[in-house]
Each structure stands twice: as C-alpha cells, then as structure tokens.
Amino acid sequence: MTSGRIDLSTEIWHRDGTNVESIKLRVWMPETATEFPAEVAVVSPVEGDSSPPPSVALYTPDQALGTIIEITDLDDLADETISTLDLIVIPGSETATRLNIHTTIALSGSGTLSSDYSLDGELQLAYPRLTAK
C-alpha cells in the first residue's frame, strides 16, 4: 500500500493435471461501494511463454458491487501457475479500509477420468493504515 492506494500482487496456483479455463475476480470495498466505488486497474497483464496473451476484460457489473476482472483464453498458461496479475485499487473514500475479492476459477482435468471444477470463494482484507494520517 502506498499513499492511499492498494497495490495487490496475485498468484494463482493449481494442482498438476488441471488446466485453468477462466478466472473471474470481483473487487470492491464494502464500506463505500454504493456511494464511492473504488477504482481498480490491472497493472501487469497475464502473459504466456509463447502464445498471445489471454483475453482480459475489466468492467462494472450491472447487478453487483465492484469491478470485474475476467481472464479467458489462457492458452499455454492454462497448465501453469499464474503469477503476473498485479492490481491497483484506489479507494473511493478515505473511510474505506476493507477490500473484498470474490473469485471464481474454472478448471478442467487433463486425464481420461478427469472432470471439470469450479472454485468459488471470497478473500476479505483489511487496510487500517488507509485512514492513518
């Protein structure tokens, strides 16, 4: 965190034998999400070793709070640890100190008897120093 902004570095690890089909993150600061939504930016796009970069969409959802970051078409990254997604979050108000990230990751298995999976969860982080002067 630097001067009222949150620098968030992410790494997405998954088990050998699985492929990431898509990643969807919804980022918001619940205290001020309706009146003063946070600004969210993707700093470093996800890139593969030899293929074109995946599709990255950043948008405000119609029926939910926050900003959506959606990553699809992962190509050669599908079977690797994804460690190059860095975000900047700028709170919409000085009183916002909590950051929520709801994540949905679609995985597929690469074996004969494998099946598809959907991981769904939420991470709640507190940044009390955002309001410290």
Image (cartoon, helix red, strand yellow):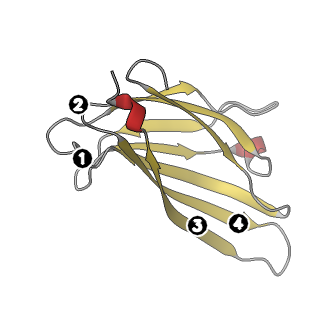
Separation (CA) of disc 1 from disc 3: 26 Å
* Left or right: residue 15 compared with residue 64: right
Type of amino acid at the residue the image marks with label 4: Ser
What numbered label is drawn on residue 119? 3
Q: Which residue is mark 1?
A: 31
**Which class describes the residues within 10 Å of circle 1: few (<14), some (14-19), or many (20+)?**
some
Helix, strand or loop under label 4: strand
Q: Which residue is mark 2?
A: 93
Residue in front for this viewpoint, 97 or 42: 97
Q: Which residue is mark 4?
A: 108
Type of amino acid at the residue the image marks with label 1: Glu
| Figure check: 122 above or below 76 | below
In which image quadrant can residue 74 be found? top right
* Left or right: residue 93 compared with residue 80: left
- The residue shown at (70%, 66%) is 108
Type of amino acid at the residue the image marks with label 2: Ser
* Sooner in the amino-acid sequence: mark 4 or mark 1: 1
State the image coordinates of residue 91 (x, y, percent, origin top left).
31, 31
Type of amino acid at the residue the image marks with label 3: Leu
Helix, strand or loop under label 2: loop
Residue in front for this viewpoint, 89 or 133: 133
Separation (CA) of disc 3 from disc 2: 31 Å
* Sooner in the amino-acid sequence: mark 2 or mark 1: 1
Separation (CA) of disc 3 from disc 4: 11 Å
Separation (CA) of disc 4 from disc 1: 36 Å
* Sooner in the amino-acid sequence: mark 2 or mark 4: 2
- Residue at the left extreme, as displayed: 35
Helix, strand or loop under label 1: loop
| Figure check: 107 above or below 116 | above
